[in-house]
Image (cartoon, grey):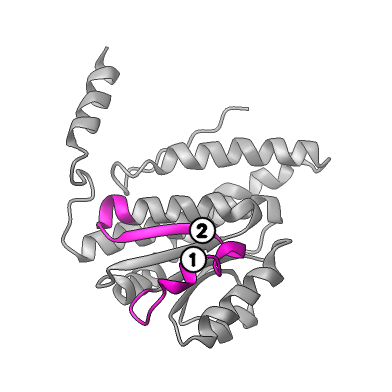
């Protein structure tokens, strides 16, 4: 199976690369789990739903645009999405961001969290959901800011988080395909609100030039 996504709106952020990799990985997971790959046919419509929620992402972007540091937490299949979210935030918004497995929050990262440092928690309805909610509760118990990436209708997250990026309810093995999109959009809009050049991030000009030259050969 060959998957291809061409979305130019986010410049050189590399959305298509990670999106295609996620689709292929999910397809393999579904085959191994004995599930019908028909679930993958839902992806185009679900992505369209997420893109229609862009103004919600803009609202969260305004909430975050002046922050200097951010912490991303994930578990299980969504841990790589935490890394991707942090990478894109620092890559184009120039905000210091780090990602950690949520279970390791108490082993160092929690000491860095202050009132000015938002914690972005990726917590869709998956097998790790209850543990992620426990991490959110620990952060909120210390009076800190939480931005959740959560499944539509999740009342627990809505009651805990300061801001929520909602994603459609999907089979849990497809959840990374959903959670990565609002995080990519978040980084883009924060950069735009800060007046930064999303198409040519600082120190990336030589990389895009090399890539363009290779494409011409």
Sequence-first disc among 1 and 2: 2
Quadrant hosting residue 192 = bottom left
| Residue 196 drawn at (x, y percent) | 17, 56
Q: Is residue 76 visible in this depiction of the protein? A: yes
Does residue 98 show up magenta in the picture? yes
| Residue 3 drawn at (x, y percent) | 55, 33
Label 1: few (<14), some (14–19) or many (≥20) C-alpha neighbours in 10 Å: few
Marks 1 and 2: CB-CB under 8 Å? yes
Q: In this view, does 38 lie above or below 67?
A: above
Residue that sits furthest to the right in the current view? 34
Label 2: few (<14), some (14–19) or many (≥20) C-alpha neighbours in 10 Å: some
C-alpha distance separating marks 1 and 2: 10 Å
The range drawn in magenta is 90-117
| Residue 43 drawn at (x, y percent) | 59, 48
Q: Nearer the viewer, residue 82 or 107?
A: 107
What residue is at 23 percent from the left and 24 percent from the top?
210
Q: In this view, does 150 lie above or below 204?
A: below
| Residue 209 drawn at (x, y percent) | 20, 28
Q: Which mark is residue 100?
A: 2
Q: What element carries label 2?
A: strand
Label count reads: 2
Left or right: where 202 falls relative to 76: left
Does residue 175 show up magenta in the picture? no
Q: Mark 1 points at which residue?
A: 108
């Amino acid at each position: 199976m060959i998957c291809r996504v061409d979305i130019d709106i986010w410049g050189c952020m590399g959305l298509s690369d990670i999106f295609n990799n996620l689709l292929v990985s999910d397809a393999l997971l579904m085959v191994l789990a004995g599930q019908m790959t028909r679930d993958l046919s839902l992806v185009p419509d679900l992505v369209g739903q997420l893109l229609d929620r862009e103004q919600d992402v803009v609202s969260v972007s305004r909430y975050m645009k002046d922050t200097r540091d951010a912490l991303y937490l994930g578990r299980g299949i969504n841990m790589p999405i935490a890394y991707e979210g942090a990478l894109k935030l620092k890559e184009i918004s120039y905000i210091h961001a780090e990602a950690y497995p949520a279970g390791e929050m108490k082993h160092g990262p929690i000491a860095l969290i202050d009132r000015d440092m938002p914690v972005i928690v990726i917590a869709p309805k998956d097998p790790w959901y209850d543990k992620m909610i426990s991490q959110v509760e620990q952060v909120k118990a210390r009076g800190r800011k939480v931005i959740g990436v959560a499944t539509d209708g999740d009342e627990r997250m809505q009651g805990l988080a300061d801001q929520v990026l909602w994603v459609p309810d999907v089979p849990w093995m497809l959840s990374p395909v959903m959670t990565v999109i609002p995080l990519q959009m978040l980084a883009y809009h924060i950069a735009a609100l800060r007046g930064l050049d999303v198409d040519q991030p600082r120190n990336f000009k030589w990389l895009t030039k090399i890539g363009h030259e290779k494409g011409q050969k």
